[in-house]
Amino acid sequence: MSGFDTIVMVDWSGGNDTGKSPRQDAIWACVARLGRAEDPVYLRNRTEAETWLAVLFEAERRAGRRVLAGFDFPFGYPTGFARALTGSDDPFAVWDWLETRVEDSPQANNRFDLAASINLQFGGQGPFWFNGLKRDIAGLPRRKDLYENPFPEKRVAETAAKGSFSCWQLGGTGAVGSQVLMGLPVLSRLRKRFDAAIWPFEPLDREIAFVEIWPSLTLGAGPEGEIKDAWQVREVARMVSNLDVETLHRILKVDAPEEGWIFGLGHEAQLKHAALQPPKLTNDCFALPPGVHWTPVRETLDMLEARLAPVTPVEVVPVSDATGRVLAEDVVARRSNPPLPNTAVDGYGFAGGKPAGVHQMPLAAGRAAAGDVPGAVPDGHAVRILTGASLPVGVDTVVLQEDVTVSDTTIAFRGPINAGANTRRAGEDVVEGAIALKKGTRIGPAEAAVLAAIGTVAVSVYGILRVAVLSTGAELVEAGDVAAPGQIFDANRPMLLELIRALGHAPVDMGRVTDDRDLLAGSLSKAAAQADLILTSGGASAGDEDHVSALLKEAGAMTLWRIAVKPGRPLALGMWAQTPVFGLPGNPVAAMTCALVFAAPAMARLAGQSWREPQGFDVPAAFSKRKKAGRTEYLRARIRNGQAEVFASEGSGRISGLSWADGFVELPEAAAEIEVGTLVRYIPFGSFGL
């Protein structure tokens, strides 16, 4: 069994039509693919839900996508019921039995009467209970204390899933009995219509498969203001679509041939882990709008920002191991900083401010030092207090010790002194319960200090982005090897590997590959298995030997972005084995420029960070240049004596200019006439994260 392309999760209802307005306790469904969930769909009754599901299954089947559909009610009853009711242990015999006997319309159904008729077959007091109608029904007790069950109260799955309800209860909080009676006939029809495989009764080797879910297995009530059912189906759909095939196979290995089983029961940790994972990128995430030929730099960056999302897994690590990692969740302060009001200076504390003039105050016994439990100071007295000490009760103002004359029993000082002077309020930095650090923040020394100050022990972070680097071209040889005439040493790969490391990611060296399409395909596949992103250099244009772009195009996941930039222009963006590929130019200066301008912010975003815009500064030019309109240009530059100098040559092969420079001068797309002293935008390499 392979994985599934489309996940649809359904929260069912056993009641009547719920009306036009979305509401709780209705039918909700949500579709997810590659970790991205669509908006939940409100379905007001079972007739509408069955039609919606049939249309979805038909469309997915035509598109060649495999579907896993989950429904939040049991697919089977406790052991013995199927044979007692139908004469067979086959759970599908119960499905067929109900399909032929359930009467259902949006306004009414016969579930209570049908349950009563079943009860009468077994003595009239069970297994079903709870009559939700105003009239009495012979054989269906209203309360459980009038109930006798000839079968087990719960399936093995319900016994293992703490908090789950019995399928015999037809109404009341958490009851699923009505959902089963009114849901199985719908599933029975859909099963036959689409030849669906039903878990765990059958192997899931067909285009469409059904599983039983219980959202509360791993989810709570959801955010305030959202309809619980809608939120839960969205989160379950997203979570299941994030499961890798190996984990999915483990979850589906269940032996429950008659009763059925709850999907994920016993694998809650894996489900919660999947819920934390970011969505996967889609093959069309790099597609350009129709009619685009030369894409401006700003438009290119905007499209990358809009389409890229984190791709690395999420894990919880101790704060001591979190430096350099990116927060996957907001960090909420467990404690205020400072936790109590304290003094910012050494001095003497008292209550209230003092007007101009000389003031004398009696001195209370003892002192307050950092770490002391706050005491109390008598009204009208002052106390000796040291920097960082929590303010005692009765103290809200501190006068500096340099401004005080002290005797054994009194102090004297001159006003005016404002109330609250030289003190810090509790929580004036961070308040308990407030967000101290936002999701997407990369943790450095300053962030480590914040986390420690608010009492954080562990944080949820994205994994370190693994970036594979592959050089292409028959002309390349390794530095130190013998270079034949016409060959050059590979400078791009060492440059890009060190760039990745400097940006805080994990470089994966994939070596070099010649201009052989089969060898390149193999290298890309190996890179995709080891990394979250692939950077190639060379072969990214549209010539005979540009095999990177050709292979990505053959894979159906390549767009050649002709960017209005100098140096650079061609940037091949695509997917290989669900791994994004950035095909950089082959010339070293162009490769470095495109890597910093386009790949660096993209890598930061894929690693979980917020999109990074490099900070530029307007400085006087130390050069003259006449620039034509049409392309944004990046000149290798450095600051000397407050002016921007540029490298003598703009050639893309002049690698020494990269070492000479400490940043770029960015010239806009429009034409420009630059003289010495003209303000130009200078972007230091540090603004790109180096």
Image (tube, helix red, strand yellow):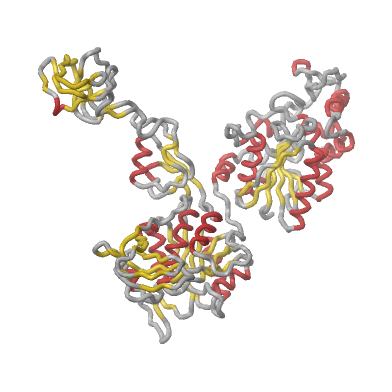
Regarding residue 547, the answer to whether it shows in the image is: yes
Along the viewing direction, whichever of 437 and 565 lies nearer the viewer:
565
Residue 482 in the figure: left or right of residue 525: left
Q: Position of residue 546 (x, y in %)?
A: 54, 76
Residue 227 in the figure: left or right of residue 318: right
Q: Is residue 72 above or below residue 603?
A: above
Q: Is residue 215 above or below residue 499?
A: above
- The structure residue drawn at horizontal position 74% and vertical position 45%, both measured from the top left corner, is 210
Q: Position of residue 108 (x, y in %)?
A: 85, 30
Image quadrant where residue 542 sits? bottom right
Image quadrant where residue 135 sits? top right
Extreme-bottom residue of the structure: 485
Quarter of the image with the C terminus in it: bottom left
Image quadrant where residue 92 sits? top right
Regarding residue 531, the answer to whether it shows in the image is: no
Residue 665 in the figure: left or right of residue 220: left
Extreme-top residue of the structure: 379
- The structure residue drawn at horizontal position 62% and vertical position 45%, both measured from the top left corner, is 238
Q: Position of residue 123 (x, y in %)?
A: 86, 21
Q: Position of residue 372 (x, y in %)?
A: 26, 23
Quarter of the image with the N terminus in it: bottom right
